[in-house]
Each structure stands twice: as C-alpha cells, then as structure tokens.
Amino acid sequence: MQRIKIKELLNSPQYVEQMVTVKGWVRTRRSNKNVSFVALNDGSVIHNLQLVVDPAHISEAILKDITTGACISATGTLVPSQGSGQSVELQVQALTILGKADADKYPLQPKRHSLEFLREIAHLRPRTNTFSAVFRVRHALAFAVHKFFNDRGFFYIHTPIITASDAEGAGEMFRVSTLDPTRLPKTPEGAIDYAEDFFGRETNLTVSGQLEGELFAMALSEIYTFGPTFRAENSNTARHLAEFWMIEPEMAFYDLTDNMNLAEDFLKYLINYALEHCADDLDFLNKRALEEDKNKKKEEQSELSLLERLHFVVDNPFERLTYTQAIEILRNSKPNKKGKFQFPIEGWGTDLQSEHERYLVEKHFKKPVILTDYPKEIKSFYMKQNDDGKTVGAMDVLFPGIGEIIGGSQREEDYDKLVQRMREMHVPEDTLWWYLETRKFGTTPHSGFGLGFERLVQFVTGMGNIRDVIPFPRTPKNAEF
Amino acid sequence: MQRIKIKELLNSPQYVEQMVTVKGWVRTRRSNKNVSFVALNDGSVIHNLQLVVDPAHISEAILKDITTGACISATGTLVPSQGSGQSVELQVQALTILGKADADKYPLQPKRHSLEFLREIAHLRPRTNTFSAVFRVRHALAFAVHKFFNDRGFFYIHTPIITASDAEGAGEMFRVSTLDPTRLPKTPEGAIDYAEDFFGRETNLTVSGQLEGELFAMALSEIYTFGPTFRAENSNTARHLAEFWMIEPEMAFYDLTDNMNLAEDFLKYLINYALEHCADDLDFLNKRALEEDKNKKKEEQSELSLLERLHFVVDNPFERLTYTQAIEILRNSKPNKKGKFQFPIEGWGTDLQSEHERYLVEKHFKKPVILTDYPKEIKSFYMKQNDDGKTVGAMDVLFPGIGEIIGGSQREEDYDKLVQRMREMHVPEDTLWWYLETRKFGTTPHSGFGLGFERLVQFVTGMGNIRDVIPFPRTPKNAEF
C-alpha cells in the first residue's frame, strides 16, 4: 500500500474509517497487557500519529522491537480517537519493523536533552520536536524568499562562491587552493606562486554576492541572490557562524526610500508567511520559548512571547530615523546618563553596539527601527555619499532581541566619487575593474541590502543560538558532519 | 513618476493612451531629421520598447547622449505602434540621461559578438538578448525547483559547503584553510598540523550534499538540497565547471522505482514550467539555435529544434531498462559493429561513454532513457547492493544532446552490507560515523538523486557551453569577476 504522510492524515477527513499505511519513527511507546500505544512521527508535521496495537495481532518478536527511534511501517484503519490530544488514531492490523534502534545505544531517549548535547548529534537532532519544527520553519522561510521575489519580477542570480575579490574590503576570508602545501611553488622573488594554483591566482570564499549582484541589476533591473557566504572570524558566540546563508537583492532605479520600503515589505511578508504556513510549529516553539524563559532570571525574560514578537513586527510600521537623530536619543537616554551602557555614547561618529540598537527598538520606540545616513567612516566604500560630505545613504533594520537584521544602502553610482572613496579606503581598483565599469557604461541610481538568513530563522523560531537554526553549523574548530 | 517595467507595459492593455515612465538601457537608436527611434530594454523581458523621440522636444545636449548602452528615463504616452514588430510605442515627452555610455569605449555595440568575447565581459553580457534570456530562464527553472518540492511537502535543507568528508570517495577537492601558507604549523612528526587550522582539521569544499541530505530524510522523510558543489578537476571542456549548483532530493521509504518516477516527474515539470513561463525567451533562444545550426556541418546539426527537443521530453514516457540490457543493444548496434564508437563495447562491466548514452537516446529509443542496475564496480559505495551480488540499484537519466542529466540510486540501508562495501572501496569509516549511525538507528529503504542545475539550464536554453549558463563561470585558471 502507498504510504500516506501523517500531515495528510491529520488534515484530510476523508481518510477516517479508511485503511491506510503510515511509515515513520517511533517517538514513544506505552504498553499494558491489552494494548500498546505507539507515538509515530514521520517529520511531515510536528504531531505524532497514535498507533493502537493489539498484542494479540502482532507477534512478540515484532512487538519487542517497537522502541524509541525504530523505523516502522503500520497498516490499519484510521478512526476517531477516544483519547485526548489527538483527533484520530490508527487501529493497527499489520506492522513491520523497517529498522531497529537498540534502546541501550540510541542517544535520543524520550526525555529532555540539552541543546548543547543535541548539537553533538546533529545527524539525529532533526528527529526531535524542536529541531524538526525549526527546520520546517527554515524551509518555509526559504520558500517564501523565492516566492516574494519571483512574484515581483526579481530574478534569482547565483553569484560565485569562489572569488578573487573581497566585497567588504575587510573581514577575514578562507583561502581556497589546490596547491600542495608541503611543496608550494615559488616565484623568483620567493613568494608563493599563485599562478600555479587552480585558478591561476589567489582565491577565497565569498563574503558577499553584492558586487556581482549589482552587475546583474544593471541589466535585468531587479535581482536577488540567496547563497552561502563565509567569515573566517574567530567568533565563538551565539550570533556568529563561519558559513551562513545570505539574501541580497539589488535593484536598479531604487533610491534609499524605495530600498527601505522593499526591506520592510520583505520582512513582513516572510514573517506573515511563516505565521500562515507554520502555525503548528510556531505554536510549539512559542510554548518551548515560554518554558525556557521560566528558567531565566526575571530581567532576562522576554517581555513578549515569540508569537507576540512576530505579530509586533508585522503589525507595526517600522520607525525610520537618521543615525544623527538616534545618537541624540541615545545620548539623552536614561541608561546613558546613568552609565548603564557598556559603551557610553559620547558623540557623533561612533558605531552603535547591540545594546544601543536594542534600546532604541525595545525601550524607546517599541517597534522595529530603520536607521539611515550613517557616518561614512564606519560604512563601506560603495555606499552613496550624501551631499553633507559626512554621511552615506546606508540603512540598517533593527529588530527586537536581534539588533541588526538587515544592512543595506543606496550604492554610489558616480564613477569619480566611487574611485575617490576607494582610494581613500585603500580598496584596490584593478581587481574591481568590472565593478567600476558599470559606473562608466549606463550607470544609474540603484540600491540593495543583505539579510542574514539564519538571523531571520532565529528571530522567527525564537532559538537563542544561531548554531541551532542551520543543519550543520561551521564554527571555529568545528566542521563535523 | 513611478517607473513601470517594460514587461508590464507590453502585457497590460490598460496602459495604452496613458502617461508612463520607463527606465532602462538603450539598445539601438535610429534617427532622421524629424524623429529618433530608440529601442529601450530594462531586462524584465526580451522585447525592447520603442521610444519615439521628437528632436523638437528634447535638447540637443541630451539627444547626443542617447547612445547604445546609456541608461535613460523616459516619460510619455504609450500608443499603439504604427511600425511592425511591436504593438505599442512610447511618444516621449521628457527624457533624462541617467548614465552615459561612451560610444567609442562601450564594448557591447549593436552587432553580433562571439560567445567567447562575451565571456570576457561577463559583467556586461546580461545586457545582451541571448544572456538576458538565458538568465531569465535560469531563474524560472530555479523557482520551479523550489515550487515542485514545496508543493509536494519536501523540505529544503542547506547542507554544509565546507566539509571534512568526501561524499563520492573520489574526485579532486579544493582545500579550505586559514593557515598562513608561508608559516605552516607542524606536528612533532613534521606533518602539517591541521589542528591549528580554523576548523581544527583538514577541510574541503563539498562535492555533494547527499550524505547530509540522507540524515535529514531519515527524520523529515522527504528533503532536497539546492546548493553549490565543487570539483577541482582540470577539465577544460564545454561540459565542466569547477563550481556548479546541484539539486539533490533524498526520500525515505522510496525504492528505485519511486525514485525513477520522481525524477521523471521532476524533469517534465521543470521543462513544462519553462515552456509556460518563458515562452518569449525560449522562442528567441530557439531561433538563435537554428541560426547557429546553419553554420555547422550537416552531420552536426540537430535533428530537432530546441523547442522540439523540449516537447520531445515532456511528451514521451522515459524508456527504462537495465544496464545489462543496454549493453546488449549497444553491442549489437550498427556503430559498434562498424567500429564507429570511439570506445567499442566489448562486454559487460565497462562504464558507458557519452557516445553510447547518446546513441541509446537519440538513435535507438528516440526518447529519454533511464538506465538502472549498473555493475557495482563502477558506482559509489552507498548504492543498494542487488541480490545478484554484481549490480547496484543505481539509475541514470539520459537526455538527448547532453547524455547523463540525473544520477541517482536507492541507498544501501543495511549497516553490515554498507560497512563491508566501504571497506572494499577504502572509504574511511571513522570520518563517516554519523552516516553509519543512520543505519544503526531506525534505518529504512530510501533513495535519492542529483541533478546538475547547469546541465538542465543548458538543455532548456540550448546553449552549447556550460560557461554560458552560469553568471560567472569558475574554470581552470579563471576566477574573474
């Protein structure tokens, strides 16, 4: 018989009183002399299907292998459930063990495991409620990204992963090479001869697809990237990964306001999509976060629940103000005057820390905030220089709990201004000749931004550690699986 | 005024007789004393919009800068066109030059450029008809991949790019490192001390996400990956890239037949999606391919046009047969008997070459072919061992012109058989402990396959060289842009 997914069985009344086959993994089993109740999960949905097994119908050899983690196939009649907690259950008529799970060795017993322990068994953690929910939500958000842009006529561009340029002009990168490190070829001057390397030059893993994305925006008008990016920074925090996925739209003919409008629409669309399509998973994650909060100190507990935070974002227009205005607010804020900030706000020009961003969002405005027009000294070379000579047309979107979730800008479209800024910031012109040429041939005002996908998944799932929202995290000293 | 995309203007009759603003890049300009005709393209669609410019209304300073490649904004009334070749045109009332393009320096003049030359200016080639069409089709196919799987309840999994394992047990890989190559740390024995490297071990760029994909299929039932993969092979051919994108679905509870059914449905869905959503671009590419064919020798010309090939795939059930049956057909074939194959078919056990695959598809069956049950010696360690002791449950989907477009298999779910095969093939068990554990804990029959995305885009667009279907190709000695 054709297997039917548990999600379908739970959502489609036509299966009631029908004979069906389900396959999945045993979560728990409770037995007495007369009956066994088996909770079966197949990953299609957070809910288990309850199997009702009459020991008289199933051989003892099979019964003893129905243990947590075992994979089974069960055929029977789907009936309305007498018990609480489920609408239907399966009266099993035939049951096959597809794969056993030795109860003494299977690491995922039906009890609470720490997230740290589950990270060590990342190959098994998607079989837990928490991680299956997180990865279903992650899928839904990824699909929503593509749907949002496709519906609006944006084109998905695969920018290169291996690159000879560094978009940010900063940040440590991973070297990519096929040279034998024990026998490196040398130039006559004694340097490593990268002409002998696979690509005939020194290459790294990309930190951003933006520059290449801009090239396509200057031809197809509206494009986006969605691919892996890399940072070789030795940051062992709950917010950093060495390998993460980034979404970077680039749009010809957009100024900074168009860019902000798109970013706000985009974030609200994604969160609404998750609220609509992942109600069961978000409900579970909401309860989970409330449980977690109970173990925290009062002052570390969230004022809003996960679901309240999601609605808070979609229901409120984002507050928009300039960096200069934000500095004034922060300078005059209570925590600044009382010396509560770890980094006191002394004046215009310094970069904002997470504590400042969160103060603006969570305490002052009580809604998401977009800061614009930052000092040019703390931003990248490619951002549009404002007429004041001091600021650039940057925008950062700040979220509760997370701080910066999107960073973007209008791009400098003027060739001379761009070259001048590159020289000031020591960005090599020769490796970026192709980027500069877009300003020579048919340049136009254009804008774009970057959204770190894992930050978004963290925000929507309420997971505190970024390592718990990507299948196999890459961090310093860790490339397992 | 809000800019409207040319695609919308051409498809929405409500804009006729309305005042609208368009922005885009000048493709050509024809002028006489009384009027200038400007062909404007904004990348939203293959068609240009014709701007009718009355020199009396526009200053001479502006007029002289309306050259090929310039970016302009034009406002005027959209009217039915008198000329042939377009349904509407814009009677321009105001025109702004957003960015000039010096006619003496702009490389993309309105004439036929070779694909080789355009590869050297990959930052500008999306502004040509051919490449804008290719990249719009590429986008549509990528979206169709996600839609196909999302509609069927598959979950998109981002498997790691940086990895310490090699899925194929073969193939040259790119090393990823942050060690200073001029000062490599050494172990007491004199070897390079990778414990000092970023990840504390030797790491490479992934060649496949399959093994990690399987882990998730054993929890969420049906998943797929869609990400970049890498081969450090020194292959300078029209079929190979060092960096390319791969789609790899993995499904619990699928046997080889289920796997073949999914692969066939998937390919037909993707091609149908392109036929429905990219009609204009495919029409252009079809004509382009016919033109190209005219310059080829008679025997190298395609029997079918591009559009005929696409319909040929969606309209025919794929022929399914075993490797063993295919060898019989090939051994008795005319080209084999007449010594026309470069690699004569001598007997059972040898791998098939592209010439054999194409003979089966194009000459013998005249439809796509799925070959199954290959000799285990020429396939990977993870494939399901058949009862005959000689073959494995592999399947390759063969397409006209391309040869293998999909490779897949049922996976070996039996722990003992898998370990035995790994030992025979010298695949290290210790680095794959997590892969082996899925066979210890709740194993089940499961299957999957890989589709090289660029091969698919090549097939659908008819582009002969794989470097022309990816934005910025990575090949030996080339990582430009």
Image: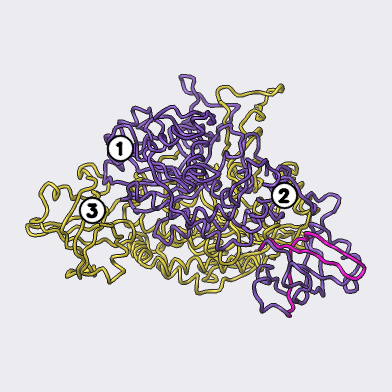
Chain colours: A yellow, B purple
Q: Which mark is residue A435?
A: 2
Q: What's the distance in space between the residues labelled 3 and 2, CA to CA?
A: 57 Å
Q: Position of residue A116 (x, y in %)?
A: 36, 48
Q: Quadrant of the N terminus of chain B?
A: bottom right
Residue A73's disc is: 3
Comparing A343 with A465, the one in front is A465
Respond whether the residues carrying marks 3 and 2 are from the same subunit. Answer: yes
Which label was assigned to residue B386? 1
Q: Chain of mark 1?
A: B
- For marks 3 and 2, give the one nearer the viewer: 3
Judge left or right: residue B43 versus residue B211: right
The earlier-in-sequence mark between 3 and 2 is 3
Answer few, some or many: residues within 10 Å of disc 1's Cα (few below 14, many 20 plus, some between 14 and 19): some
Observer-side mark, 3 or 1, equals: 1
Label 2 or label 1, whichever lies nearer to me, is 1
Q: Amino acid at mark 2?
A: Tyr
Subunit under mark 2 = A
**Residue type (three-letter) at the residue carrying disc 1:** Asn
Between A193 and A1, the one lying in front of the other is: A1
**Numbered range of the magenta stretch:** B17-45
**Rendered image quadrant of residue B174:** top right
Going 39% across and 43% down the picture, which residue do you hit? B321
Quadrant where the C terminus of chain B is found in the figure = top right
- Residue type at tag 3: Ser
- SS class of the residue under badge 2? helix
**Measured from the top left, where is residue A169 in percent x and y?**
66, 46
